[in-house]
Image: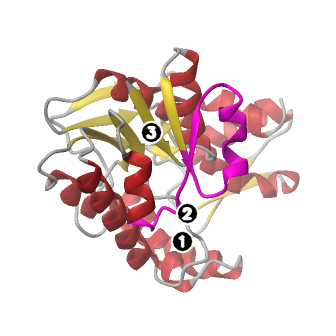
Amino acid sequence: MTYAVVGASGHTGAVVASTLLDQGKKVRVIVRDRAKGERFAARGAEVAVADIEDAAALQRAFAGVDGAFVLVPPNLQTQDFRAYQRRVVDAIARAAEGAKLPHIVLLSSVGAQHPDGNGPIAGLYEAEQRLRGLPATKSTFIRASSFMENLGGSLATLAHGFIPAFVPADHAYDMIATIDIGKLAASALLEGARETTVIELGGPPVSANDVAAILSELVGKPIGVQQAPLAAVAPTFQSFGMPADLAGLYQEMLTGIANGRVSWEGGHRRVQGSTPVKAVLAGMLGG
């Protein structure tokens, strides 16, 4: 049995590849730059070079494998993020169909049951629909909650005694560590699939107030929350250099988190992550 891992140079893909290799499985890492696959090659993995938007290259990389972990990597430079998502999904789907790939594990997201009102997550709704239509491929959609690692963007203001928040400071929502996502994805690959299924991967519900309290303990001084309106998301992100299109999508997503649209669908297998947010925050602070 051989398993392919797209995005092995990223945080989640690296965990998937490493977890499989730790268990003695045959792994083919798919990277855009061969040098980024060398650390896995040193552990016995095959390295396939393919751009995520190149269906022909991906098909060659998928040839002969029993399952593949795939995702739509972030692209913070594109001026049309949804068009970029569609190109990636189209390439993955055409490659899987051409290679007669038996099983795909897709990193999806909480809220991906909705076609709109969820910002960039709408692209994962489309990805799920497209992959469901593949006649020879079964899919496992891991709808993960918000990444704990995304809290890193809030740490720049710690020296000033606060973290910023757009979602109301007392609104708690599930967060998950990327290590827990990667481990579940590796497990799903090993389990295989007789039918297409959804796994809802949650973590502890955490609010900005909770994060501030944990940070206060970690840094040894009081940390507060500076609340900003949701309408300020897009202009704030644009001021940091994010394209207007993507900044608007993030505003829609955060609004969806606040109003409950970006939430669990229910009726699916539910898995709870084991990594506490305090451990992730401590790691980002170098603790």
Q: Tag 3: residue type? A: Ala
Farthest top residue in view:
23
Give the total number of marks visible in the rendering: 3
Q: Where does label 3 land, which residue?
A: 4
- Horizontally, is 92 left or right of 233 in the view? left
208 over 43 or under it: above or below: below
Q: Please, what secondary structure does the residue beneath circle 3 have?
A: strand
Q: Where does label 2 land, which residue?
A: 166
Q: Where does label 1 land, which residue?
A: 229
Q: Tag 1: residue type? A: Pro
Q: Position of residue 9 (x, y in %)?
A: 63, 46
Label 3: few (<14), some or many (≥20) within 10 Å? Answer: many
Quadrant, the C terminus: top right
Q: Are marks 2 and 1 in contact (CB under 8 Å)?
A: yes
Q: Nearer the viewer, residue 137 or 287?
A: 137
Q: Tag 2: residue type? A: Phe
Residue 275 appears in the figure:
no
Cα separation, mark 3 vs mark 2, equals 38 Å
Q: Which mark is residue 216?
A: none
